[in-house]
Amino acid sequence: MPGSTPGPTDWSPESWRHRPAQQQPEWPSAEDLARAEKRLAGLPPLVFAGEARRLRQQLAEVAAGRAFLLQAGDCSESFEDVVADVIRDKLKVILQMAVVLTYGTGVPVVKVGRMAGQFAKPRSAPLEVVDGEELPVFRGHMVNDDAPNVRARVPDPTRLLEAYHHATATLNLVRAFTKGGFADLSQVHAWNLQFVADSDAGQRYERIAGEIDAALRFMAACGIDLGAEEALHQVDFYTSHEALILPYEEALTRRDSLTGQYYDCSAHMLWVGERTRQPEGAHVEFLRGVQNPLGVKVGPGADPADVVEVCRRLDPGREPGRLTLIARLGASRVEELLPPLVEAVRRAGHPVVWACDPMHGNTLTSADGRKTRRVEDIMAEIRGFFAVHQRLGTWPGGIHVELTGDDVTECLGGAGAIAESDLHLRYTTTCDPRLNGRQAVDLAFQVADLLRAEPDPSRA
Ligand SMILES: O=C[C@H](O)[C@H](O)COP(=O)(O)O
Ligand SMILES: C=C(OP(=O)(O)O)C(=O)O
Ligand SMILES: [Mn+2]
């Protein structure tokens, strides 16, 4: 059974407190923080250990080269976007991408949202200048508000509770949508948002949807009872976020009554960010004791020996499905930097999933000072990632992307050819630039083409 290795005996949910923790807010009141932690610790878990174990099993299939991981959602979820239509549209785009990938390749797709808890952000600098005024930086709605004034930027521990409640509302809707009929394959046309349907990618998607309809009609005509096939009517959709604010994660960590092991019940999968993955640091210490599937971001400065050390701490049992390494190396350097990392981890015997985050190594600033990314760089990094794995005979296990279902103008180029002069039109992200629905579905088609060129996934 995944996670069958007993949890470490020299660990407790609070043992991270003895290690240096990067990127933690300076909460103005220790008492208010303690009150919020106490309340959170008494609230029900958001996800269940059995669900996290099921995701581990599915990720073990990815590690073995028999499935593909699609991890996607906002850079930083906004409390203001915990609105039915926004959540539904994001889900539609992710389901569409999954259909494109599965239908085009025959490879099962494991779907994980950066959703229902992605409310905290690590930042490169503690201060920023907005309209000439120096302000503490926005750290995600779990910590402070993004409004550009000093009062809004003061960390407020009651936001930890608000984050929990916003995550709960999001997850409730996600569960209803994915288990209650909306994700039924007969709805495949309805996932095509109007602004996506009008694009080339949207029309290509419509053709696939038509073929799926025809296949379903064919099976029904052959006498197959489609109503009885659960897989046609529901999808498994999992949640994930960066485990950044450790008092929040600790408060939601619970011992599973079935196995006696600890799970961080704030999300199915947690990852440690590029800025907090120090082997001796508090974040790695916290995550090594919870049995959820874990991600580790790996940036261009990563030393292979350090990455192996993090793998040793987080995956001592060398269990497939436990660890996903999410490489975010940049389009221009992926082919140079990824091979030594893959080789070192392979030599150390960790059966990790390798996923490509083509967003964070390709961020640039536009002339008017907005963070943006070129879709062509994003695609170039994905192509480089596939090329490296093909050369090394390893499986390019998945992609990790920032997107929204809204028709935003945050990333340059791609389907819809967004120019720098368009960025201001609908630039609504609270942190990093996201692909809009059209750009995301188009990207899925290109990734499906790359996956199709891979050796038969049933090889393993
Ligand atoms: O994903 C988020 C960003 O890349 C990270 O928070 C750093 O952003 P910054 O360089 O604007 O602080
Ligand atoms: C901050 C992020 O990534 P990284 O830790 O890789 O910079 C992120 O995924 O939004
Ligand atoms: Mn980001």
Image (tube, rainbow, N blue to C red):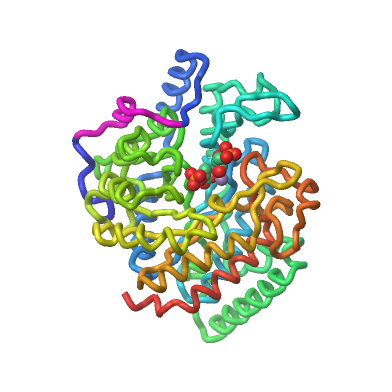
Q: Quadrant of the N terminus?
A: bottom left
For the residue pair 45 and 328, the one nearer the viewer reads as 328
Q: Position of residue 157 (x, y in %)?
A: 52, 22
The x and y percentages for residue 182 are: 61, 59
Number of disc labels = 0
Q: Is residue 218 visible?
A: yes
Quarter of the image where one finds residue 147:
top right
**x, y (%) of residue 337?**
42, 58
For the C terminus, the image quarter is bottom left
Front in this rendered view, residue 352 or 48: 352
Q: Residue at x 46, y 17 (%)?
A: 35
Residue 454 placement: quadrant = bottom left
Q: Residue at x 62, y 45 (%)?
A: 432
- Could you say where residue 138 lies in the image, as x and y percent from the top left? 61, 31
Where 50 sits versus 224, above or below? Answer: above
Left or right position of 417 against 337: right
What's the residue at 50%, 14% (across, down)? Answer: 29
Seen from the viewer's position, the closer of residues 31 and 348 is 348
Residue 194 in which image quadrant? bottom right
Magenta stretch, main secondary structure, is loop
Q: In the image, is residue 47 above or below residue 331?
A: above
Q: Is residue 172 visible?
A: no
> Which residue shows up at 42% across the image and 45% down it?
271
**Would residue 215 appear left or right of 343 to someone viewing this image?**
right
Quadrant of picture, ligand 1: top right
- Locate residue 286 relative to residue 70 in the image: left or right: left
Any magenta on residue 196?
no
Q: Which residues are magenta?
A: 10-22
From the viewer's side, name the closer residue of 458 and 316.
316
Q: Is residue 17 magenta?
A: yes
